[in-house]
Image (cartoon, grey):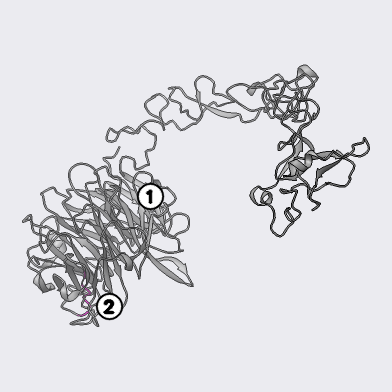
Amino acid sequence: MWLLALACTDKPTSTADCEVLLFRDDDGDGWGVEEAWARACPEAGWVEEPGDCDDLDETEHPAAESPCDCALSDATRVWFEDLDGDAWGAGEGLEVCQGPAGWVLQDGDCAPDDPSISPGDAEVWYDGVDQDCSGGSDYDADSDGHDHEDWGGDDCDDDNASVHPDAKEICDAERLDEDCDGLANEDDPDARDFRTWYPDADGDGHGVPGDTVVACSPPEGYAGDDQDCDDDNAEVSPSAEEVCGNGVDEDCLSDSFICGATGQASLSWSEQIWVSEVSQGQPSDLAVGDLDGDGVAELIAGDPWFEYVGGSTRPAVLIAELGEEVAEDGQVLEAELDSASAYSVGAGDVDGDGVDDLLVGEVASNGAVNLLFGPVTAGTVAEGTDLRMEGRIGASTGGFALYADIVADVDGDGMLDVLVSDPYSSWNAANQGESHLFSTAGSGTTDVYDAFATVGGENAYDKVTHGVVADLDGDGLPEWTVYAPEATRTTTGSGAIWVLDVGAGGSFVTSDGVELSGSGYRAYLGWSVAAADLDGDGYRGLLVGEPAWSNSSSSDGRVHVLTERPTEDGRAIDQATAVLYGDTYNEYAGRAIVATGDVTGDGLEDAAVAGYAGSVTESYQGRTYLISGPVTGHHNLDLVARAELLGETRYGYAGRLLAAGDVDGDGLGDVLIAGQDGVHTWGAVYLVPGGPGE
């Protein structure tokens, strides 16, 4: 309708001195229409405010209580007058819904009267015209602030912004003259990034210390490092692949554990896979298992002192993926389960579904052990528990679940069983201790009264604790060995172990089994026990630690190796096939022992024995021995060990805890050693892979 009115109205008068942008206002509401505009002197019927969408209705305009549709439906935009028709405008912008004819949204035309010049045109360099309105010199094509040397400037390469007289000369493969002084790379004394090159006689890309050359690139016969350990053999260098078992150090890493540990070596060469987050924090127990079913083992650490929260420590079960990519300075944990204490942990495929299950001991009140069927991820132990085994009400003083593990199937139901011990149980005598085997069938909550088998101590303060389950005589049935390292037998604290048949289940006392006792005052026979087939006869024997046994006045410690099942009571040393002794002052050899599986690949099971306070190169650094059987006779451990692994720091106590499993999936046993890291003296776990050796 306003178009009809506009047709009858002439435009206002325009003069050279008066060119105000005006818009036609037929309804007198003070708002004009964008389509009818003129540059002229103000007069009646013309206004400076555009945006009216109904110029015949004075109630419809952008400032009305109900603004017109234009303001509601279209956001206002800024328009610019395009005088030369090149689709680029210039000058003062106009903010309206729809710009007048000849107005555009693109601003920046530096030549409003020349349609061949605008920001949308291609630049033609060196003609003195700024076709693309970019500003700057038309003789500086690379915009580095220097004009081309052919046009009165000093830039020797106007196509490369990194080349100009103010640039720094660097070593580069293209041999560019970055600073335009006519010299490149090592020919230019101003060049940076010179390297030192080392003689490389065998041409394997690795040199040796000697007559070096400083240059940008290596001269013939030189290499970038001096790490070659045999410069006469191109098959030997840090880049070569190690061939295990041939006696040649192909990769120049003779102290590493790539082929498995041999000789005496520091744990600083191993992979440190976990460090406690709390100063002086230490894992209380270790296990290895594939909890998520991905075919790669995880480290499982119970840590009652994981971190400080609100002025007290928070315990946790820590689960770290191991595999091939293990960070040297401690791997970020994949899962973290809040726990009441996490003093003991274990792993094994209890239910036979192909995924390992998690066992967590909870030392609180009467105590409990929680079994979580895999896969297991982050969360809380309480939320994930499928089967809970509780201690004896009123008889425990907080020791139930101090020791717990997943063991072989004793009750014959086709599922692995759970072994739980309480050294402080006083159900019959003060702290006589007891150990329980639980069937894992079912779910929910059970207690010691429903245990498949229980073995209790008979004397006060025997503190019967834990044990191992293994076939010791080759009859296909596992025997249960329990131990009481603080029991008084031949002398105070001499310690004892008992081997029992419990296949039918029930309640037993230690005298129902065959007893082997220690022979030293507070020598603590049975502090640690493991079962391994060192001699390859098809069934396992026992390795029994006596860590505080004294040679004269020091607690060097020793380990008794029994390849046959004990059949009569007596002293362990009298029935041992071999006795292995620690050889440093107060070493406490035998404090921790673990069956490692076949570490060397020779088909025989091996074992690791720790003297956690051994001092060899540092005081109390700790040492762990790898034992490959068979072994007989009486020997110092260092004389029969395949390898001695030394803690990396003073007071490192490496070997305080041991665990084992096939961590890297190569079919060989790997060893996990707990101690303290070499930086913070916090709890740390080291991984030593299996292998045949160099």
Helix, strand or loop for the magenta stretch, by majority? loop
The amino acid type, in three-letter code, at marker 1 is: Leu
Dot 2 alpha-carbon crowd within 10 angstroms: few under 14, some 14 to 19, many 20 or more: many
Q: Is residue 377 magenta?
A: no
Residue found at x 58% / y 29% = 195
Inspect this view and state whether residue 467 appears.
no
Residue 130 lies in quadrant = top right
Q: Nearer the viewer, residue 584 or 432?
A: 432
Could you tell whether 691 is left or right of 15 in the image?
left
- Separation of disc 1 and disc 2 at Cα? 39 Å
The boundaries of the magenta stretch are 460-465
The amino acid type, in three-letter code, at marker 2 is: Asn
Where residue 375 appears, x then y in whole percent? Answer: 29, 56
Could you tell whether 105 is left or right of 391 in the image?
right
Depicted 142 relative to depicted 622: above or below: above
Query: Given the current orientation, which residue lies at the most extreme left position?
Result: 475
On residue 102, the disc is: none
> Dots 1 and 2: beta carbons under 8 Å?
no
Give the mark nearest the N terminus, 1 or 2: 1
Where residue 367 appears, x then y in whole percent? Answer: 28, 74
Q: Nearer the viewer, residue 77 or 681?
A: 77
Q: Nearer the viewer, mark 1 or mark 2?
A: 2
For the C terminus, which image quadrant?
A: top left
Residue 184 lies in quadrant = top right
Where residue 435 appears, x then y in whole percent? Answer: 19, 71
Query: Given the current orientation, which residue lies at the most extreme right position?
Result: 17
Residue 58 lies in quadrant = bottom right
The residue pinned by badge 1 equals: 267
Inspect this view and state whether residue 528 appears.
yes
Could you tell whether 119 is left or right of 662 in the image?
right
The residue pinned by badge 2 equals: 366
